[in-house]
Image (cartoon, helix red, strand yellow):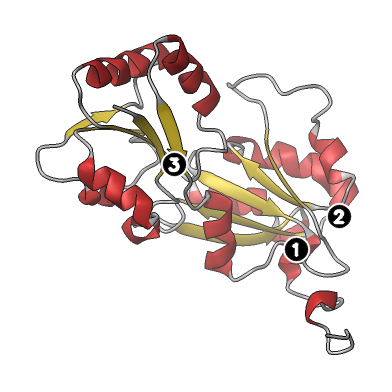
Amino acid sequence: MTVHFVGAGPGAADLITLRAAGLLAAADVVLYPGTYIDHAVLGHCRPGTHLVDTQKLDLDQITAAMVEAHVAGRDVVRMTSGDPSLYSALHEQARRLDAAGVPWDVTPGVPAYAAAAAIVGNELTVPLVAQSVVLTRTQARSTAMPERESLAAFAATGATLVLHLAITRTRELMGELDPLYGADCPVVVVHRATQPGEVVLRGTVGGTTAIADLVDEAGLRQAAVILVGPALAGTAAGESWLYSTGRQR
């Protein structure tokens, strides 16, 4: 049997892939992070599926559950929020499965930042404004960030920033970004994108519409993504050469 790492998408049950839905429907055992995944997604599982909420389990306990199911000849799905390529502990879990001789594969999902951008109707790359997107996080009660990956270093590029696992440090982070992006730079926060408790906040790095004030008022503490950058202003500074009427075809 194979352990399938499956991206559950941002939360909505209809925002998982057809492949993911098929794997869930066939699974005997499904491990899922209850802190981040809306239970509606589990509706793709058939009745009688053994469901394991991993939010209070460590990696060794999670691995043990997957190996045990594999040895018993049961189909296993290990769900992650969003897409497994981002902050899913895929590397650590796969390494443990390799050591145990358990085969595995990965099915991608819709990442939370993409869902957030869709909800507010923003493209994160706008011609002549920003053509790069930086996906990063900050350190609080989490694994240390490599020294070369400082927020200031990324912000110096002027790219659109996507901050994960950072909502409790919003005010501090905006203070770091103010000298580089300016107080009027637009910021979007989306909490539980596409889920029933979705909250969308639009503000700026600083000033009278400071996003930190809005986050405090909303009482957000987890499950949120922060988007920062001039591309979020929605002001067109240029048009894509790919689709230009002046380009010879």
- Provide the residue designation for mark 2: 182
- Provide the residue designation for mark 3: 81
**Label 1 sits on what residue type?**
Thr
In percent of width and height, residue 178 lies at: 84, 48
Q: Is residue 162 above or below residue 168?
A: below
Of 146 and 8, the residue lying toward us: 8
| Residue appearing at x 64%, y 36% in the figure | 169
Q: Earlier in the sequence, mark 2 or mark 1?
A: 1
User: Which image quarter holds the C terminus?
Assistant: bottom right
- Provide the residue designation for mark 1: 125
**Label 3 sits on what residue type?**
Ser
Check disc 2 and report its element: helix, strand or loop.
Answer: loop
As drawn, is 160 to the left or to the right of 103?
A: right
| Residue appearing at x 54%, y 24% in the figure | 91
As drawn, is 228 to the left or to the right of 99?
A: right
**Label 2 sits on what residue type?**
Gly
Of 102 and 58, the residue lying toward us: 102
| Residue appearing at x 73%, y 73% in the figure | 234
As drawn, is 22 to the left or to the right of 202?
A: left
Mark 3: few/some/many CA within 10 Å (<14, 14-19, 20+): many
As drawn, is 132 to the left or to the right of 81?
A: right
Q: Is residue 138 above or below residue 109?
A: above
| Distance of label 2 from label 3 (alpha carbons) | 32 Å
Label for residue 96? none
In the orientation shown, which residue stands out farthest toward the bottom?
245
Please tell me in which quadrant of the rendered image residue 59 appears. top left
Check disc 1 and report its element: helix, strand or loop.
Answer: loop
User: Which image quarter holds the N terminus?
Assistant: top left
Mark 2: few/some/many CA within 10 Å (<14, 14-19, 20+): some
Q: Earlier in the sequence, mark 2 or mark 3?
A: 3
| Residue appearing at x 74%, y 69% in the figure | 233
